[in-house]
Image (cartoon, grey):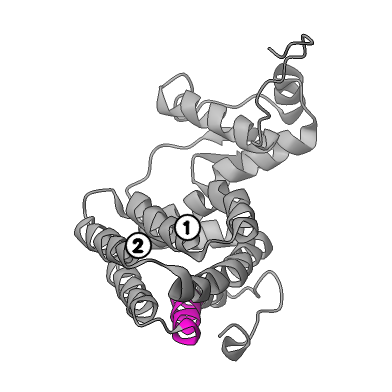
Amino acid sequence: MRPNGLVLNPVSTERVSDVIADRLTAAIRDGTLQPGDRLPTEAELARDFQVGRTSVREGLQKLRAHGLIESRKGLGAFVRAAPASDPLADFARWTASDPAAIEQLVEARVALETLAAALAALRATDAEVDELERLNAAHRNAEGTGDLVTTDQAFHAAIMAAARNRFVSGAYEVLIHELTDFREKTLALPWASDRSVRGHEAIVRAVRGREPIEARKAMAEHLWVLYSEIEQAAAAEGRPPGLPLLPREAIS
């Protein structure tokens, strides 16, 4: 408490729809909601959570994208039985859930992280470059352990730190919640681990060589693969991308 009695509590940056999705997901995970159970209506959930129906609708959409619930025409939303793990099907379902938002997230990553990689090549200390090597080794060794997401997050966060630009880092922090969901889907693909490690290795080589142009290109290539996989998933399902996509040469 300040001397004048003013109390300033921490400000939450969580979106209401994410909080709703997290609470319903927890109820499904702990068995409060069982497979086959019908969820309350949007109106009932909005009343119970004391939020708007738009936030409820967005929260339910996130659960559908994760395969936790399904809608039955005229009946409502129901908890799905846990399916056998199928990363490719999960990825296709996820990219179809809100393709425009997912594509925009990749574009934001490209804008921020290619710049950060170039800056890191100019500003990283030798110790920071060594740490990037260590973090990528940990990422390589994480295959099959369930730690691919956390080791990938650590590597990219270290690039941001080495860039030494608080505005770029601040903009990246805004994306962290969405990026966790993104990484969980993309890194579950069968080829993802090798692809990710190779991308990191190219970035580290350029940073260690103090080559900002090459570092930017390496990061662009690393992230472009994700962009193209989302486009391919849309094409395989016979649907267009959410928005017109940038050509490859526009992001290098």
The answer to which quarter of the image holds residue 19 is top right
**Residue denoted by label 2:** 128
Residue at the bottom extreme?
249
The residue stretch that appears in magenta: 212-225
Q: In the image, what residue type sits under mark 1?
A: Ala
> Mark 2: which secondary structure?
helix
Around disc 1, counting alpha carbons within 10 Å, would you say few (fewer than 14), some (14 to 19), or many (20 or more)?
A: some
Q: In the image, what residue type sits under mark 2?
A: Glu
Q: Is residue 21 left or right of residue 42?
A: left
Q: Is residue 247 left or right of residue 145?
A: right
Pinpoint residue 99: horizontal percent, then vertical percent.
63, 63
113 or 231: nearer the eye? 113
Work out whether 52 lies above or below 205.
above
Q: How many labels does the image show?
A: 2
Residue at the front extreme?
3
245 or 45: nearer the eye? 245
Work out whether 130 lies above or below 37.
below
Name the residue at 32% across, 48% down.
84
Magenta stretch prevailing secondary structure = helix
Q: Residue 246 carries which label?
A: none
The answer to which quarter of the image holds residue 148 is bottom left
Around disc 2, counting alpha carbons within 10 Å, would you say few (fewer than 14), some (14 to 19), or many (20 or more)?
A: some
Pinpoint residue 119: horizontal percent, then vertical percent.
52, 72
Q: Residue 161 carries which label?
A: 1
Pinpoint residue 247: horizontal percent, then vertical percent.
62, 87
Name the residue at 49% across, 60% down.
160
Q: Is residue 61 visible?
A: yes
Name the residue at 27% across, 48% down.
146
In the rendered image, residue 214 lying in the magenta stretch gets the answer yes
Q: Marks 2 and 1: CB-CB under 8 Å?
A: yes
